[in-house]
Image (cartoon, coloured by chain):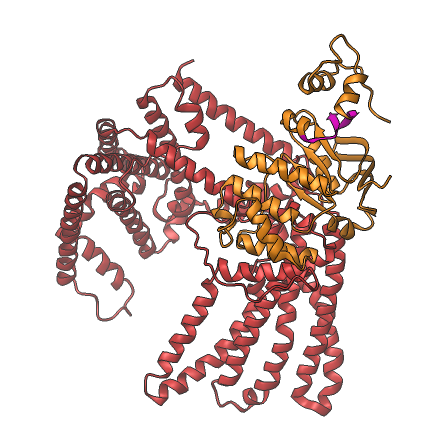
Amino acid sequence: MSFSSAVVFLWLASSRNRLRLQLQRLRRPRYLVGALVGLGYIYSIFLRRLEFGGALSNVPPGVRLFAELSLVFSALVTVFSAWALGPDRPSLTFTESEVVQLFPAPVTRTSLLHYKLARGVLGAAMGALFASLFVGRLVSHAPGLFFLGAFLSLGTLYLHATAASFMRTRWAETWGTRGLVARWLALGCVLAAVGLAAYAALDAHPFPRTLSVPGVLRNWVQAVVASPGLSAVLWPARLLVAPALAQDSSAFLSVVPPVLGLALAHYVWVRLAEVPFEESAVTQAETRTRERAQRASGGVAKGRAVSSRKAPFRLSARGRPEVALIWKNLITRRRMAGGVASVLASLLLGCAIVAMMGESRFFTDTRRVLGPLGVSLAAMMAVVGPSVFRMDLRMDLPKLDLLRALPLAGWQVVGAELAASALMVGLLQLGLLTVGLLSGPGAEDPWLMTWWWPGGVALALLLPSMSLAGLFVQNAAVVLFPAWVPADRTGSARGIEALGQRLLTLMGSLVVSLVGLLPAALAGAVVGFPLWSSLDVWALPLGAAAASAVLAGEVVLGVLLLGRAFEHLDVSEDRPE
Amino acid sequence: MDFVLRVAGLEKRYGAVNAVQGLTFAVAPGEVLGLVGPNGAGKTSTLRCLAGILPPTSGRVVVAGYDLAKDAVDAKRELAFLPDEPRFFDYLTVWEHLNFTARLYGVEDWEERGKALLEEMELTGKEKALPGELSRGMKQKLSIACGFLHSPKLILLDEPLTGLDPIGIRRMKASLRRRAEEGAALVLSSHLLPLVEELCHRLLVIAGGRAMALGSLEAIRSRLSGPEGESASLEDLFVRITSGAGTEKPPP
C-alpha cells in the first residue's frame, strides 16, 4: 500500500469510525435529545439564513463593501503575519500521533510535506465552508462560486504562510541575526510604502465633514481605496478574493485563471523552499500534548500565569475540616486570576485620577456616574457572577477521585466548594453597592432620593443570596448531570449532541433559578406588603431580608440533598476504568 | 483477630460490565496484601471501591471497624489512597498541600511530620513549588507524603512505583515496609511481580473481576497442582492462574 493510499485509508476510516461512534451515542436518549436540539439550533442560527437567491438585493451596499474590504484586508494581514509574527521555524504542525506513526514510517520528507499540505488544503475547504455560511450571503449571489473562490484564496494563503515559514527558517539558519535585520528592513520598507500610499489617498480624499447624507461614507471609502497608491497595495489581495466575489459563472471563469496560477506558483515555491521540519514538528507536538494533558487533568496549561500570592489566611490544623476546601479555593482565586481584581483596581484608580484632576465638576460628574454604575454592576453580578467565579465543583469535579477520597461527607464537600465562590461574589457585590450607595443616585430626583438607601440596603441583603442560589444551580447541574455539563475547562464532549446538551442545561439552569426565586419573592411580598403602611419604603429591606432568608434556606436544603447525590455520583458510565 | 480491612461480597458493575465480582478478603494490621491480575482484571476498580471513591454495586467494606457505606467519613479518616496517576490542586504549593491535608485529617503536629516526610521523599526545597512544576516522580512522592501525613491504618496503593527512579524505588519500598511494621495494613496493586513478591505477605490474584487465588505465595504454590507447582515462580503462577492453567478454585 502506498503512502497516499494509506493516508486516504486513515482519513476515511477515522471519519467513518467517528461517525459510527456518534451514531452509537444517539442510542442514549440524552444524546438523541441533545442532537435534535443542537441541529435545531444550528439550523435556526446558520442554515435558515442561507437564502442566497434574492438576499443580496436586501443587503445595503455599505455592508457589502465592508464585507469585501474585510476579505481583502484579512488576506493582507495573513500575508503580513506570515512574514512578521511568530518564531523562525516551519509552520507545519503535526500531532503526537502523526509524529509517532508517520515519522518513523518508510516515507520521504516530501511525502510528509504533501500529507501536511493536503491537510492544510482540507482545512482551507472547511474555512471556505464557514465563510460561505457567515459572509457568503452578504457578497455573492452564488454560494457554490463563493465557496470555490474562498477555497482557492484560503488554500493559496495557506501555501504562502508555509513557504514564508520555510524562507524565514532558511534565512535564520543561514544568516542568523543579519537575516532577521534584513527581513525587518524589507518589512519596514513595505510598511512605509503602504503608509505613504494611505497618506496620499487621505490627502487627496479628506474625511467628509458631515456624514448626515446617506452614502457619503461609502463613497469616501470607495474613493480612498480606488486612489492609485492604495489600489496598487490592495491589488494582490483583490486579485486573490476576486473569484469569491464573482457574481456569476462567466465572471468567475474570467478571474479564476490568475488565482489558479498564483496557487500553482505558491506550490512550486513551497517545494523549492522546503527545509527540514521534523525537529520543530516533534517539539511542537510534544508541547501541545503536554498542555492538553495538563488541561484534561484540570491543570494549568503552559503560558497561563500562576501568581505566587500568599494564602488568604493561615489554616490551622484544628477546626472544621471543610474549611480546608474553602481555603484551597480562595487561594485558587487569588492565584489563578488576579484579572478581575486588577480590572476593578484599575477602574477605581482611573476614577480616582479623574476625580483628582482638579475641577470640582469632574468630581461631581464622577459621583453621578459612580452611583448608578456601582449599583448596576452589583445587580449584574447576581447574573454574571456565578458564571465568572468558578472555583467550586465545576473546577474540581475532574478530580473527583481526590474529592471522594477526602474524609468529608457529601454535604460538607458541596457546601465548602460553594462557599468560596459565594464569598467572593458576595463581597464584590457588597463592595460595589457600598461605593454606589455612598456616591449617590446621580440625580436630584426626589423619588430616586427617597428610594436610594432603602433600595440599596434591600439589594445588599438580597443580591448575595441570589448569587449563592445561582452558584448552587450551576454546581447542581455538574453533579446531577455530569455527562451533560463539562466540568473541566477542556469541554471534553464535542459534537452537535454536546452543543444541544449544553443549550438544554443552560435553559434548565435558568428555569430552575426562576422557580427557586418564586418562594423567595412570595416571602418578600408576605413580609413587605403588611409593613408598607407603617414603614413606607423601609419595608423594602425587610421584605428583601425575608426573601434572602428563604433563598438561603433553599440553598441549605439543596446542599444537603446535593451532598447525598455527590456521595452516590458515579461517573464511570462515561468514564470507565 | 481484628482486621483493619474487611471486604465481603464486593461487586462493581459498569452498565453491563461486571468489573468486580464477589470479592471477599480481609487484611490484618501490619500485613501487606498484593493485588495482582492482568490488565482490566478489576484491580483499580477494587481499590477505588475500597477507598470510597466509587460506590460498590453490592457488598460490604469495613475499614478499621467503620462500615464504608454507613460511616464513610470515619472510615476515610483511617485510610490513604495513593493512585497510580497522582492528582493535585493546581494552585496549592507542596507545603500547602500538606497544610490542607493536615486540616482535613486534624493532624496538629503536621509541620514536623511534613518536614520529615518531605525529607524522606527527597522533596526538601520544593515546599513552594506548584504541582505543575514537579516531575512525574516528584508528584508521586508528594502524593505519598500527603497520604502518610495522618498515619493511616490502611494504605491503598495503585502502582506505587510508577515514575520513581531506582533510589526512589528503594526508599519507597523501605518506607512501605516501615509503615507495615508500625502496624498499618497495606493493599498494593502492581504489575511488578518482583515488588509484590518482595513486599507482600499475601496475594490476591484477580482476573475478570473474580478472585482466582488468595493466600501466601507458598500456600498458593502448594495448592497448585502440576509437575512444577512446587518450584514455580510468581510469574509462572500468575500466568497459570490468570490463564486458567491452574486448578486453584476461587476462595469462598
Q: Residue at x 51, y 89 (%)?
A: A445
What type of secondary structure mainly makes up the magenta span? strand
Residue B251 screen position, x and y as percent: 84, 25
Viewed as shown, does residue A266 lie left or right of B186? left
- Chain in orange on the image: B
Q: Is residue A268 above or below residue A136?
A: above
Residue beneath the point at 71% across and 69% down: A552
Q: Colour of chain A?
A: red
Image quadrant where one finds the N terminus of chain B: top right
Estimate the x, y position of residue B236 in percent, counting from the top left: 68, 16
Q: Is residue B99 shown in magenta?
A: no
Q: Is residue B204 magenta?
A: yes
Q: Position of residue A239 (x, y in %)?
A: 23, 41
Q: Nearer the viewer, residue A15 or A271?
A: A271
On the image, which quarter does residue A519 sit in? bottom right
Q: What stretch of residues is rendered in magenta?
A: B199-215
Of all residues shown, which one is farthest toward the top? B227
Image spot of residue A123 (x, y percent): 39, 35
* In-image side of A61 versus A450 (left or right): left
A286 or A561: nearer the viewer: A286
Quadrant hosting residue B141: top right
Picture layout, residue A479 above or below residue B231? below
